[in-house]
Image (cartoon, rainbow, N blue to C red):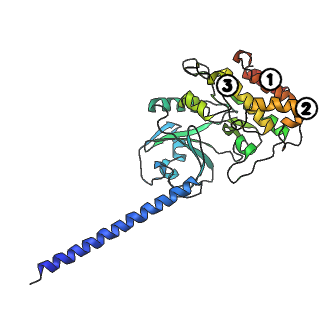
Amino acid sequence: MDDPVGTWLILFFCLMLILLSIYRTIRLILTRVATMRAKSSEGKVTNTTPMSLLEVKLSLPTKIIFGDAAIAQKYDAAELAQLSKIRLGEGTLGTLYKVVLNCGSIITMRKIRDGLVSTADLEFWIKFFGGLSDEWLLPMQFSLWYGGEAFVIHEYLCLGSLEELLHGSEGVQFTPLNWKIRLQIALSAAKAVAAIHIRVTKTGKGLICGVIKASNVLIKIDFYACLSSYETPYLVSPSTIIRRNPGRIAPELALPQSNPRLFTHKSDVYSFGILLLELITGKKPSVTNLGEYVKEKLKREGLKGVSDKRMVDVKENVADMINIAGLCLSNNPKKRPSMDRVVEMIQGLE
């Protein structure tokens, strides 16, 4: 007859081995996940770097916010979960990724930051802005919920943003832009803002941009520009936008008595004036008070002291562009021109 005590000891020993094996496996998985997250924060290209729930290779609940059934097949969430992603940056709306599709096309995908607005408001504004069509506005191609997270898909523009071209980015040097190209970018960006201003919400209120900044001005292959993230002021609170964009906000919005702080067409014009000075000087407004910087440089050194030193073909109409920017930067909002008028003035410089 077998010894029952010995049998139980053997079973206990086997159970301990199994538990030890499971423990080691779990530790290995956690170590790999931590390593992949570290790589993700450095912007590495990886097929398994956790981007969010979109990278979990499971069939999670999916709901289309904007786009038809045919586009939904092209941007199948389960397939997107398997693809390599490059983290391009973190914006006010959320994290932006570059994704290469199996067909070879390249898109950008933004994971919308949690808690910006209610689910109903998020869907309403994504559908609203997804329905806008204009050559100067970056079109929204598709948007969906996947596993409780919202994503928006756009076309990928290989030249990136004006921010990257003017100031460079991590691992990428700035691109020396001549004055002709800068003038072209200024004009198309002005047309983009004007295209927003001529439209209204479903309640009849004029649309606004909130802030116009170089990172939201994307450059096409022909060096014309289009505007992205124009839905931001409808998904993000004014106080957050003001706090995240020092140097670009109209002075009336910074006053303590400005409560509630409401963006207007005229505050957009001020922000655009800062963008013009950024194009001319190559300086970041978050580092330098561009309006005061240009005034002092003009007094001391003239036009050459103001213009970006990397711009070799400084023309006399740079001074005219500075004057246009000055009108946009008037402390009195009523004295600032409309964006349609700004477009006309810039066209007169060509």
Locate residue 133, reporting x and y percent. Answer: 64, 31
Identify residue for label 1: 344
SS under mark 3: loop
Q: Residues within 10 Å of mark 3 (few under 14, many from 20)?
A: many
- Whether residue 311 is situated above or below residue 85 in the rendered picture: above
Is residue 278 visible in the rendered structure shown here?
Answer: yes
Q: Residues within 10 Å of mark 1 (few under 14, many from 20)?
A: some
Residue at the (48%, 29%) spot, across then down: 121
- Whether residue 256 is situated above or below residue 112 in the rendered picture: above
Identify residue for label 3: 250
Question: Which numbered circle lies on residue 316?
Answer: 2
- Label 1 vs 2, first from the N-terminus: 2
Q: Quick one: quadrant of the N terminus?
A: bottom left
Inspect the image, locate mark 1, and give the three-letter code of the amino acid beneath it: Glu
* Distance Cα–Cα, label 1 vs label 3: 22 Å
Locate residue 22, reporting x and y percent. Answer: 34, 67
Locate residue 286, reporting x and y percent. Answer: 68, 37
